Each structure stands twice: as structure tokens, then as C-alpha cells.
Image: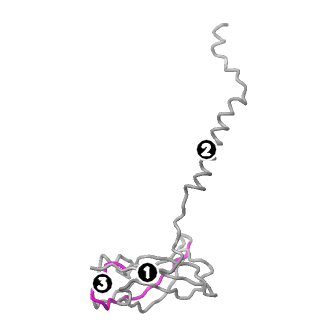
Amino acid sequence: MADDALFTPPTEPRSSMRTPLLIGGGVVLLAVVLMLIFGHHKVQAPTTVAPLDSYAANLPLSGIEMSEATSPFAGGRSTYIDGKITNTGTRTITGVTVQTIFRSDDGQTVSLQTLPLMLIRTRIPYVDTQPISVAPIVPGATAEFRLIFEGLPQSWNQQQPELHITGVQSR
């Protein structure tokens, strides 16, 4: 029967086996909480209106139209701003950054978004866009553009937002 003693499970009390597990779980939980508090930084959207680019006066926007679509797949609403941009200056434009200001009924800014202006490449079978760098806008030329916005706040007054050209790349 001496051999049976070799197969006897340890007689350590159960509570002492749980202690390392509880300590380990507590350490992991603490690490997650600290990471969420100190290590997870959300990128902040701009909160102030940027100045106009010095070349912006040479890039009038016209024919501005807004439309909206709801995606059954994504479950969200997309807002589109289409229009035309004309290069009345002397430089060839390879990129444009637009700051868009959406307001509430009382005139407060509810969304301030900065994004690149995308040119419309095709309309059929759907609207497809491309960066301006793919088809630069030469002096005197006009091009169609589209801006796409997702998840705008409910407090937006549904009016056309302000469009400010805050960055221009050229050659």
C-alpha cells in the first residue's frame, strides 16, 4: 500500500490554491483599468475654425448640393456634399483640405470636420471618388467633388454647412 501514497492528491487546503488565481485576476483587472484611464487616448477633432489657405480665394466652390443615404448594411446614415471647384489661379492643384462646420438651430457648432476634398471620378453605376493628386486641377479648370460624412449629430440643423478651404497643395 505504500505505492498508493504516491497517487494521493495533495492535501493543500482549497482556499490557498485560489489565492494566486485571485491575485492574478486582480492584477490583470487593475492593468486593464489603468490602460483605459492612462493609455487610451481618443484623437480629438479640431475645436476651432482653421484659417483659410492663402490660395483659397483662387478656388471658388459652386453648385453645392447635399444628399443623404442610409446604409442597410452599416446601419448608419451618410451625408454627401457635392459641388464644383474651379482653379482661377496660376498653380496646378494637387490637393485641397476642407474644414466643414455643421451648426445647430441656435447657430452653435455641433460638428467641425476637416477632410480632403475628393474628386468625382465616375457617376455610373455609382459615384466613385479619387484624390485630387490623381487628376490635378490645372489653372482655369473646373472639377466635380464629393465630401462624405458619417454619423453627424442629431442636433445638426440639416442646413448646408460652411465649407472653408484650409489647405492647398500645388505644383
Q: Which residue is mark 1?
A: 98
Farthest residue to the top: give it.
Answer: 1
Q: Residue at x 41, y 76 (%)?
A: 116
Position of residue 78 in the picture relative to residue 171 (left or right): right
Of pointers 2 and 1, the one earlier in the residue sequence: 2
Q: Nearer the viewer, residue 160 or 66?
A: 160
Is-magenta flag for residue 81?
yes
Is residue 1 depicted above or below 7 in this figure? above
Residue 11: which quarter of the image? Answer: top right
Check disc 3 and give the amino acid type: Ile
Image side of residue 34 versus residue 140, left or right: right
Q: Amino acid at mark 2?
A: Val
Q: In the rendering, which numbered label is found on residue 137?
A: 3
Query: For the residues marked 3 and 1, what is the alpha-carbon distance in whole angstroms?
Result: 16 Å
* Residue drawn 54% across the image and 63% down it: 42
State which quarter of the image contains the N terminus: top right
